[in-house]
Image: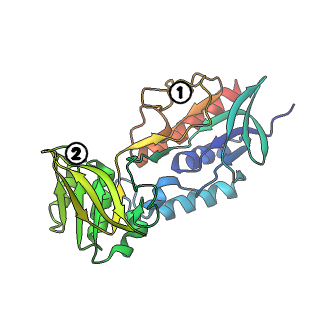
């Protein structure tokens, strides 16, 4: 049975889009499988912080337009199964089965949930995952941000431009974020760190009204708020990937130096991959590197 494409890329975040562009420019026929918005998590960032400047949504949109102009097929469905069928790799979606000589898994990662009472119940009713998107809704109100890494501090800084008070709850006694973000935090008197503190529940009636926290002394208390944002890390979005593709202890996909996984012809790049650097420049470079490895494989 003939292949539908040389390469199928699962995920249209910055990694996947750069892989698609590199593959198309190298003469491969490419399909991109993505059920959500192109650009991935970068769409949540209005102002990019680092070597790549501009708006995250603008970056994603320009890449997607370029990839479309180069002739990529867009499959707007989630991947449900990745399997081998003879010499081909098969990606199954609701719309059918798609065959290719190689697959790049660039499905990225999703924000972890705390798994506490009220978190799921108040989703979109005060529980949010995007400060850039929802910050204006909390103008002159109090919000809670959970976490101590880059994402938590970045989102707290965004929210500080709108909210009356940002309670930054962290279970440790110091932030793990990059120093320049910690320094920026000190310039905002309305950001209040809560050290050695964990969130036990999100409270409310029809919407978020408070969170219950537990301090280092074991005493419980409540912080009144209208918005709740948790940034406690990421987990890989790779439920469709078979067990033949090895994972690390956290579930991220293991690869060799060429970004190929233990499943021949299947590559992984970006936030779904074990060892990913975490910067936007890494997302770009890994997407390009994975596509170059696919081209080398197909030429052989």
Q: Residue at x 23, y 60 (%)?
A: 222
Q: Position of residue 149 (x, y in %)?
A: 28, 47
What is the x, y in percent for residue 112? 42, 46
In terms of secondary structure, where does tag 2 sit?
Answer: loop
Q: Secondary structure at mark 1?
A: loop
- The residue shown at (69%, 54%) is 76
| Location of residue 168 in the rendering, given as x and y in whole percent from the top left corner | 23, 57
Q: Which residue is mark 1?
A: 258
Quick check: 94 left or right of 129?
Answer: right
**Residue 272 makes an appearance in the image:** yes
Residue carrying label 2: 171
| Label 2 environment density (alpha carbons within 10 Å; few <14, some 14–19, many ≥20) | some
Q: Residue at x 41, y 48 (%)?
A: 113
Give how far apart the Cα atoms at labels 2 and 1 are.
38 Å
The residue closer to the viewer here, 83 or 112, is 112
**Res. 49 in view:** no
Question: At 64% across and 53% down in the image, what residue appears?
Answer: 35
x, y (%) of residue 118? Answer: 40, 56
Please state if 49 lies on the left or on the right of 61 as rendered: left
- Toward the right, the furthest residue is 1
**Which quadrant would the C terminus be assigned to in this image?**
top right
């Amino acid at each position: 049975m003939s292949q539908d494409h040389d390469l199928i890329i699962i995920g249209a975040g910055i990694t996947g889009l750069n892989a698609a562009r590199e593959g198309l420019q190298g003469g491969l026929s490419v399909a991109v499988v993505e059920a959500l918005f192109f650009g991935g998590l970068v769409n949540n960032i209005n102002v990019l912080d680092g070597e790549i400047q501009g708006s995250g949504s603008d970056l994603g949109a320009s890449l997607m337009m370029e990839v479309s102009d180069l002739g990529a097929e867009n499959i707007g469905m989630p991947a449900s199964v990745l399997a081998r069928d003879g010499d081909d790799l098969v990606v199954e979606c609701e719309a059918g089965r798609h065959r290719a000589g190689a697959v790049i898994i660039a499905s990225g990662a999703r924000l972890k949930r705390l798994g506490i009472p009220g978190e799921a119940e108040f989703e979109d009713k005060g529980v949010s995952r995007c400060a850039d998107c929802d910050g204006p809704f909390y103008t002159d109100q109090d919000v809670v941000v959970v976490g101590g890494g880059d994402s938590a501090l970045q989102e707290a800084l965004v929210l500080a431009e709108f909210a009356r008070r940002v309670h930054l709850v962290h279970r440790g006694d110091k932030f793990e974020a990059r120093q320049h973000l910690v320094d920026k935090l000190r310039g905002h008197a309305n950001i209040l760190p809560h050290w050695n503190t964990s969130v036990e529940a999100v409270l409310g009636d029809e919407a978020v009204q408070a969170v219950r926290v537990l301090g280092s002394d074991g005493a419980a208390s409540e912080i009144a708020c209208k918005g709740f944002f948790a940034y406690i890390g990421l987990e890989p979005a790779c439920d469709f990937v078979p067990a033949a593709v090895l994972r690390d202890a956290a579930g991220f996909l293991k690869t060799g130096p060429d970004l190929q996984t233990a499943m021949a012809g299947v590559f992984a790049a970006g936030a779904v991959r074990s060892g990913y650097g975490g910067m936007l420049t890494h997302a770009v470079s890994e997407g390009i590197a994975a596509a170059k490895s696919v081209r080398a494989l197909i030429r052989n």
